[in-house]
C-alpha cells in the first residue's frame, strides 16, 4: 500500500469521517474505495469510447436510391 496526503476543508474532512463511520471503515479506506471505483468507471468508459469510435460506418442505403426528403416523410 502506498500512503498519500490529501488536503480537505474542515467541513469535508468532518463529512468524510461521518460517512466512513457509517460504513464502519476508516477515512483512508473509504477514500481509497471511492478512488478505486472512480478509476474503474473511467477505464470502463474509456474502453467503451474507444470501441465505439473505432467502429466502421454502416451503409444504411445499399440500393443507392435517394433518401426521401423531410417534407415527403411528414406529408408537408
Image (cartoon, rainbow, N blue to C red):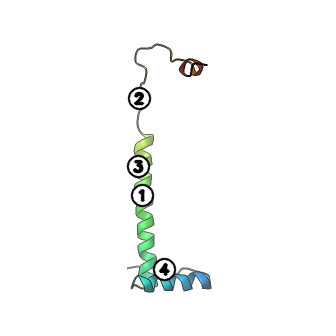
Locate residue 34, reporting x and y percent. Answer: 44, 72
Q: Quadrant of residue 14?
A: bottom right
- Determine the residue positioned at 54% across, 79% down: 6
Mark number, residue 4? 4
Label 2 vs label 1: CA separation? 27 Å
- Residue wearing tag 1: 43
Q: Determine whether 74 is above or below 31 in the image.
A: above
Residue nearest the viewer, comparing 13 with 15: 15
Q: Quadrant of the C terminus?
A: top right
Label 4 vs label 2: CA separation? 48 Å
Check whether the beta carbons of the residues at disc 3 and disc 2 lie within 8 A of each other.
Answer: no
- Residue wearing tag 2: 58
- Tell me the mark number nearer the camera, choosing from 4 and 2: 2
Q: Quadrant of the N terminus?
A: bottom left
Check whether the beta carbons of the residues at disc 1 and disc 3 lie within 8 A of each other.
Answer: no
- How many other residues sit within 10 Å of disc 4, few (<14), some (14-19) or many (≥20)? few
Q: Determine whether 17 is above or below 62 in the image.
A: below
- Tell me the mark number nearer the camera, choosing from 2 and 1: 2
Check whether the beta carbons of the residues at disc 4 and disc 2 lie within 8 A of each other.
Answer: no
Q: Determine whether 51 is above or below 66 in the image.
A: below
- The number of numbered discs placed on residues in the rendered structure image is 4
SS of the residue at dot 4? loop
SS of the residue at dot 1? helix
- How many other residues sit within 10 Å of disc 3, few (<14), some (14-19) or many (≥20)? few
SS of the residue at dot 2? loop
Q: Which comes sooner in the sequence, label 2 or label 1?
A: 1
Label 4 vs label 1: CA separation? 22 Å
- Residue wearing tag 3: 48
- How many other residues sit within 10 Å of disc 1, few (<14), some (14-19) or many (≥20)? few
Amino acid at each position: 500500500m502506498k500512503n498519500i496526503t490529501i488536503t480537505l476543508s474542515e467541513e469535508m474532512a468532518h463529512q468524510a469521517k461521518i460517512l466512513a463511520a457509517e460504513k464502519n471503515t476508516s477515512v483512508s479506506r473509504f477514500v481509497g474505495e471511492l478512488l478505486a471505483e472512480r478509476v474503474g468507471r473511467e477505464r470502463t468508459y474509456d474502453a467503451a469510447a474507444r470501441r465505439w469510435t473505432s467502429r466502421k460506418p454502416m451503409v444504411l442505403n445499399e440500393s443507392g436510391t435517394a433518401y426521401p426528403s423531410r417534407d415527403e416523410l411528414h406529408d408537408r
